[in-house]
């Protein structure tokens, strides 16, 4: 059975973290009734865009969806059940911040139908939590993991590494602690200095220094080794899971399967009349809300994805996975990968890509430098 995911974006946060370039905004007041109604209306529209599918995953992302009233989460899940057939084992994930106020809502979120929680812990050390501008401290982070474990069979948490002055020994110790607290999944991201963030300006002014390429590579390798030997190998560049604990929703993106997106800035990729459609909703929260209220959806762009773009997107996503790209499965879904052997051969010779059993796979070394591999493959 083919997978079909639904992404729901909640764009609000208590404060803007200095490293974050996600579509997230701080607002003093959110009109909860208008927001709930708008999300439901856009779901109605999405069901017209991609009707008759069986939903295998739903993902509430943000922003901070743990700030959504649990009633709104319940209403969204209920509406999805009315608009599509929902697979009995569907994975329903919600991204949560670990403040005590939000942790107090975890039981209600489980009740609403969420069955997997993804927590933004970011660090298991006080000083880096302050550096990252987080609204929670270590004690709150640990308490939230505890509450998550109590209510959810499946939970994951995020950490950010390659932080200023981070030593290999300290990261190893932090990883061991994380492994001890982990459920079936962990996301471990290298700190990226994103343009337009406060960190971008501070970093340019020399206010802090991030690990150089060599140190970052060593931290990455330590991460791979430690997690693999603990039984949570990397199944994607930054994502680790026990076998079967992989995020089914994120696999939809990486395997280039179909999904629709609702909420500000949400993207969709779904097949309609045999062609892949790409949609993007308006990013600004207020603009999106007004558009939905006026016309039933906040679509800013919708286009048919051409064959060349499909090939690029499928490779960009699929080569992130340890399993790589299943060329035949993609072809069956109308995505033909035709690679230039002259570009492929040197990447294989240099140990960055492999072709085995009908799959194109980036090796661990290749995944570490995936952007440059993709540039060489496409240019
Ligand atoms: C949509 S974000 C946020 C989830 C949630 N609002 C939170 O902050 O806990 C998903 C994850 O991306 C990671 N992330 C965001 N910006 C990053 C950056 N600049 N570098 C590395 N990781 C980043 C963080 O680990 C974060 O938890
Ligand atoms: S990291 Fe999470 S809490 Fe912080 S601004 Fe981004 S989305 Fe909001």
Image (cartoon, grey):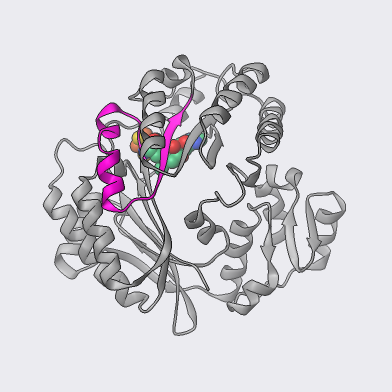
Indicate the position of residue 138 as horizontal and vertical percent values: 41, 19
- Of residues 193 and 226, the one drawn nearer to the viewer in this rendering: 226
Q: Position of residue 257 (x, y in %)?
A: 52, 67
Relative to residue 151, is residue 347 drawn left or right? right
Q: Is residue 112 magenta?
A: yes
Give the magenta part as a residue range: 96-123
Up the image or down, 331 lies above or below 190; here it is: below
Q: Position of residue 112 (x, y in %)?
A: 26, 51
Measuring 38% from the left and 50% from the top, which residue is drawn there? 115
324 up-or-down from 16: above or below: below
Residue at image point 71% right, 33% down: 225
On screen, residue 370 versus residue 268, left or right, reads right
Q: Is residue 333 above or below residue 29?
A: below
Residue 91 shows in this picture:
yes
Quadrant location of the C terminus?
Answer: bottom right
Say whether residue 166 is magenta.
no
x and y percent of residue 14 in the render? 26, 32
Name which quarter of the figure residue 92 lies in.
bottom left
- Closer-to-camera residue (358/16): 358
Residue at 78% in and 50% down:
352
């Amino acid at each position: 059975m083919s997978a079909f995911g639904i992404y729901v974006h909640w764009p609000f946060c208590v404060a803007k973290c200095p490293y974050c370039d996600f579509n997230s905004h701080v607002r003093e007041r959110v009109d909860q009734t208008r927001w709930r109604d708008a999300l439901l209306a856009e779901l109605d529209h999405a069901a017209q865009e991609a009707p008759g599918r069986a939903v295998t995953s739903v993902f509430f992302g943000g922003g901070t969806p743990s700030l959504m009233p649990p009633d709104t989460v319940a209403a969204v899940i209920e509406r999805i059940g009315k608009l599509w057939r929902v697979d009995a084992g569907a994975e329903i994930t919600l991204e949560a911040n670990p403040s005590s106020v939000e942790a107090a809502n975890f039981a209600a979120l489980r009740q609403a139908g969420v069955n997997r929680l993804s927590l933004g812990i970011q660090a298991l050390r006080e000083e880096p939590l302050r550096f990252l501008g987080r609204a929670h401290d270590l004690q709150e982070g640990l308490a939230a993991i505890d509450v998550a474990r109590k209510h959810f069979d499946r939970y994951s948490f995020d950490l950010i590494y390659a932080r200023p002055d981070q030593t290999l020994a300290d990261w190893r110790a932090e990883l061991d602690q994380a492994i001890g607290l982990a459920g079936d999944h962990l996301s471990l991201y290298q700190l990226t200095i994103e343009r337009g963030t406060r960190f971008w300006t501070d970093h340019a002014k020399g206010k802090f220094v991030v690990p150089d390429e060599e140190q970052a590579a060593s931290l990455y390798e330590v991460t791979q080794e430690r997690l693999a030997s603990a039984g949570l190998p990397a199944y994607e560049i930054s994502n680790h899971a026990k076998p079967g604990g992989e995020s089914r929703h994120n696999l939809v993106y990486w395997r280039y399967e179909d999904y629709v997106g609702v909420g500000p800035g949400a993207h969709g990729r779904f097949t309609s009349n045999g062609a892949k459609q790409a949609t993007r909703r308006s990013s600004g929260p207020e603009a999106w809300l007004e558009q939905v209220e006026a016309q039933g959806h906040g679509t800013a762009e919708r286009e048919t994805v051409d064959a060349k773009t499909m090939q690029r997107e499928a490779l960009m996503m699929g080569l992130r996975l340890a399993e790589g790209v299943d060329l035949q499965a993609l072809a069956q879904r109308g995505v033909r990968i035709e690679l230039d052997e002259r570009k492929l051969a040197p990447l294989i010779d240099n140990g960055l890509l492999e072709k085995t059993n009908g799959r194109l796979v980036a090796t661990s070394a290749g995944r570490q430098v995936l952007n440059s591999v993709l540039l060489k493959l496409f240019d």
